[in-house]
Image (cartoon, coloured by chain):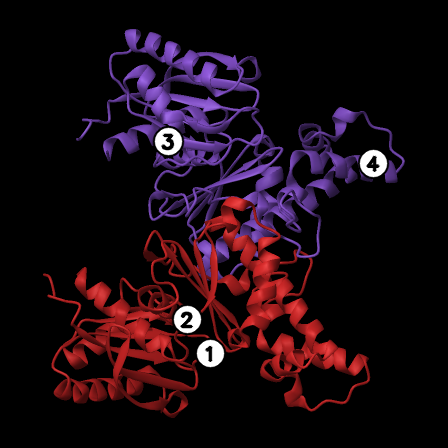
Chain colours: A red, B purple
Amino acid sequence: MSSRITSASLAVGIDMGGTTVKYGVVRGHEILDERPELPTPAFKGPKPLLKELCVRINELRKKHKGIAAVGMGVPGFADITRGYVHELTNVPGWQRVHVSRTLTVGTGLPSYVENDANAMCYAEFLHGAGKGAVNMIAVTLGTGVGGGLILNGALYRGSTYGAGEIGQMGIDHAGRRGEHGNTGALEKYVGNREVTARARELYAKARCRVAAEDCEPRALSAAARRGDPIALKVWDEFTTHLAAGLCSVVWLLNPDRIVIGGGIARAGKLLFDPLKAKMKAQLAESFRSHLKVVPAKFGNDAGIIGSAAVALDLARRR
Amino acid sequence: MSSRITSASLAVGIDMGGTTVKYGVVRGHEILDERPELPTPAFKGPKPLLKELCVRINELRKKHKGIAAVGMGVPGFADITRGYVHELTNVPGWQRVHVSRTLTVGTGLPSYVENDANAMCYAEFLHGAGKGAVNMIAVTLGTGVGGGLILNGALYRGSTYGAGEIGQMGIDHAGRRGEHGNTGALEKYVGNREVTARARELYAKARCRVAAEDCEPRALSAAARRGDPIALKVWDEFTTHLAAGLCSVVWLLNPDRIVIGGGIARAGKLLFDPLKAKMKAQLAESFRSHLKVVPAKFGNDAGIIGSAAVALDLARRR
C-alpha cells in the first residue's frame, strides 16, 4: 500500500534526549509548529512518555491537516525495520520498547524510530549543509562524538543499525581506554569533558588560576581568539585528533562531504581552518580534491527536522 | 539495451599486477580456462599490453562461445563509469588510459575496469567467504594492505572510486609517517616489509643470528608455532595493530562479515584466534554478535574471478 506521501506532506518530528523531548510539525526543512519541550526524567519510562506524545500529536493533527507520519529520534540504536529500541543506555527504563507500534496505535499514523545522529545526518543531507552530496559523513561534537553516514544518496545503517560510531574509532592503538574496552577512541580525545580536563591540566601546569568555566570549550575558543597560548594549544591538539579520526573515515569511505555539528562546531574558522589544513596534508589528491568539510546548517532543530524526514521517507516506501 | 547476460554467461577476467597479468575464462566461481600469465614490464605501457590482451581474448572466444564481457582488475583507482584509469602508481606508463574503450574496440565485447581489491572483494562476496553477507569488508594483507567494501549487498566505491583504503587508516595519530603525509597508517605496522623489519630488529636486540628469510612472514609463522618467543612477540604486535584498524572499520560500518586474504592470512589460527579475541574485547555487543571474521576462500584466483564477475554485473545493468 502506498501512503500517498508528497513533497507537501507534513510529519511530526520528535527529538528525544536524556533531559528533554522536543517535537514539532515539520514541512521540508521548516518547523511549522514547535511545541514546548517535555522533561524526559519526569516520565517514568517509555509507556507514559509515549502516551503523552500520542496525546500531543493528536492535538497537533486537529490544527495541521496534512500530517502523514511520525518520526522519533532516540539517543541509541534503533531497529528501524521493527520500530524497536533494544536499550537506551542513558535513559532509565528504556529497554525493549516497541516505539513505532505504540505511536501508531495511539495516533493511527505510520510511525518510525531512528537513531538521533542518523536523523541529524538526514536533515543536513536533505535540507542543510549536505545538500547535493552523494556520500556524506555527519559528525556531532559534544560530550560524545556521534556520526551518521549517507552513502550513495541514502542513509547507511549497518548490519545491526549501529553504523556511524565515529567517536569509538581509534586514533591511538595504545591510547586511552574507552567504555567498550577499546583503546584510543576519538571521543576520549575530543569530547567536551576531555577538552575541559586537558585545559585544566595545562593551566594548572602553567600555574595559571582560571575559573572552572574558563576551561569549557566555549570559553576556550574565546581565549584562543585573544591569543591565549594555553587555549591555542588545547585547540591545536583538538584539531590534530579530530583530523586523525576524520582522515581514517575519508580513506575508508571516500566521501564528498563532511558536515560537522554540535557545540564545538560553533567555533567556526578557529576549528575549520586548521582542521581542513591538517586533513589536506594527510590525504591523497583524489581523496581531498572532491571533499568539502563544512559546518552543519541546523543546530538544535536538526533532530526534529531529520526525524520527520526519515518518517516521510520510510512511509513513502512502505 | 540489455545484453542478455544470464547465470550461464562467461566472461574473461584479467588480473593485472605490477609484475604479471593473469587472465582466464570464468563461469561463476570457476576458471574454465586460465592462460599463462604475461609479464607486465615486458610491455612498454598500456597500448601494447591492451593490444596483446585483445588478441588473446579473441583467441579464447573461438574456443568458448558464451563469453559476454571482459573485466580487468588494476592495482589502483579505476573510474568504472568511464572505464578509465587516471594513474597506476606502481606501473610505469599507465597514465590517462581508456581501458574499457580499448578492450571493447579490440574485442567487440562490453569491457570494464575495476580496482583489484574491489574485484577480489566481489569474488569473495559472490562465490567465496563472503557468501550470504549483507555488509562485508574485504582486507588483503601483503606489502600493502588493501580493502574492498560491500554495503547493502553492493560494491561501494566512494565519490572518486577510492573507497576501501583500509591500509591508510590511522591507528596512531602521532605514529609513523605514511606516503601521503598521514600518520600511523595501518599499512606501516602490518605490511610485510614492516613485519620483517620488526622481526629483524627484535632478533638483533636479542643477539640472535637469523637468516634474512627467517624474518619473512611465512618463516615467522612457522617459528611462532614452534614457540619462538620473538616470532610470538612479532605476531602479537601484528594482531594488536590489525585488530585496532579493523575495530575502527567495524565501529564505522557495523558489518556482518570481514574476509581476510593475502599471504599472511594463510597463517590460519595463529592469526585469526588472537585477532578475533582482541577485536571482541574492544567492541560493543551489538557490533560483535553478528560479526564473522573469516579467511578468504580464493587465493590468487580472486582477481580473475572477481574482475569477470564485476564485468558481468555491469554488463547486465547497461
Determine contact: label 2, label 1, CB under 8 Å.
yes
Residue A240 can be seen, yes or no: yes
Residues at marks 2 and 3, common chain? no
User: What numbered label is drawn on residue B203?
Assistant: 4
Answer with the quarter of the image where residue B131 lies: top left
State the residue position of label 3.
Answer: B83
Is residue B224 something that shows in the picture?
no
Mark 3 vs mark 4: in front: 3
Mark 3: which amino acid? Answer: Gly
Q: Is residue A23 left or right of residue A257?
A: left
- The Cα–Cα distance between marks 2 and 4, rounded to whole angstroms, is 48 Å
Kind of residue at badge 4:
Tyr
| Dots 3, 1 in contact, CB < 8 A | no
Q: Earlier in the sequence, mark 3 or mark 4?
A: 3
Res A270 quadrant in image: bottom right
Under circle 2, the secondary element is loop
Disc 1: host chain: A
Q: Which residue is mark 2?
A: A76
Which chain hosts label 2? A
The residue at which mark 1 appears reads as A90
Which of the 4 image quadrants contains residue B142?
top right
- CA–CA distance in space, label 2 to label 3: 42 Å
Number of other residues with Cα within 10 Å of mark 2, as a class: few under 14, some 14 to 19, many 20 or more: many
Q: Are marks 3 and 4 on the same chain?
A: yes
Indicate the secondary structure of the residue bearing disc 1. Answer: loop
The x and y percentages for residue A179 are 57, 68
